[in-house]
Image: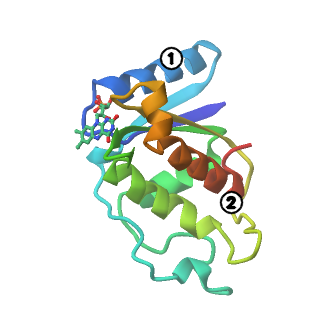
Amino acid sequence: MRIIAFNGSPRKKWNTATLLEKALEGAASRGAKTELIHLYDLNFKGCISCFACKTKGGKSYGRCAVKDDLTPVFRKIEKADAIILGSPIYFGTVSGEMKSFMERLLFPYLTYTDPPQSLFPRKIKTGFIYTMNTTEEQMTERGYVQHFKSHEMTLLHCQLNY
Ligand SMILES: Cc1cc2nc3c(=O)[nH]c(=O)nc-3n(C[C@H](O)[C@H](O)[C@H](O)COP(=O)(O)O)c2cc1C
């Protein structure tokens, strides 16, 4: 089993990275091959809305057409059995880097249908670790839970949350 974790914090040794490392340690102890990728080490931007991934019959249908450091990462994800996304909460939602990563990873796999179908080649599991500086009550009061549910729903539509 191959599991890849993505750290959406600029800090490589603090809260988010520590929890991701612990999750991977647990998986490795059960025989999984693991990898931790720090998004801040990669050179990429968010979705540029070129819609090449939505052009049926085009060479990039269902795939991000932008070529940068994320290109090999997406190919790795297509071969993984599970991924774990980890992000600090910045101003009520995930970090900018994690948001950009999610746009690039997820948008190409969603068809423009109602309900959306997934073009992701397989069904894999996803975990999401959020770290923040709030109590559980504040998390609900401030609407963070809505963000988490929305991410869960998007991942589900992409078949990345089975
Ligand atoms: C720019 C910035 C914005 C933040 N905004 C929030 C926030 O809105 N809510 C919150 O609970 N914590 C917020 N925090 C705190 C971080 O989410 C928290 O310390 C997190 O665990 C840091 O993760 P890291 O150690 O992996 O970098 C913010 C921190 C920074 C640097």
Front residue of this view, candidates 48 and 63? 48
Which callout, 2 or 1, points at the residue further toward the start of the chain? 1
Is 147 rendered above or below residue 71? above
Q: Secondary structure at mark 1?
A: helix
Q: Secondary structure at mark 2?
A: loop
Is 2 rendered above or below residue 118? above
Quarter placement of the C terminus:
top right
The residue type indicated by label 2 comes to Phe
Return the residue at label 2: 120
Disc number placed over residue 25 in the picture, else none: 1
**Left or right of 55, for residue 34:** left
Q: Report x, y in % for residue 150.
A: 58, 52
Quarter placement of the N terminus:
top right
Residue located at (51% from left, 70% from top): 64
Residue located at (48% from left, 56% from top): 102
Identify the image quadrant of residue 10.
top left
Front residue of this view, candidates 31 and 111? 111
Q: Report x, y in % for residue 151.
A: 56, 50
Q: Report x, y in % for residue 90.
A: 31, 44
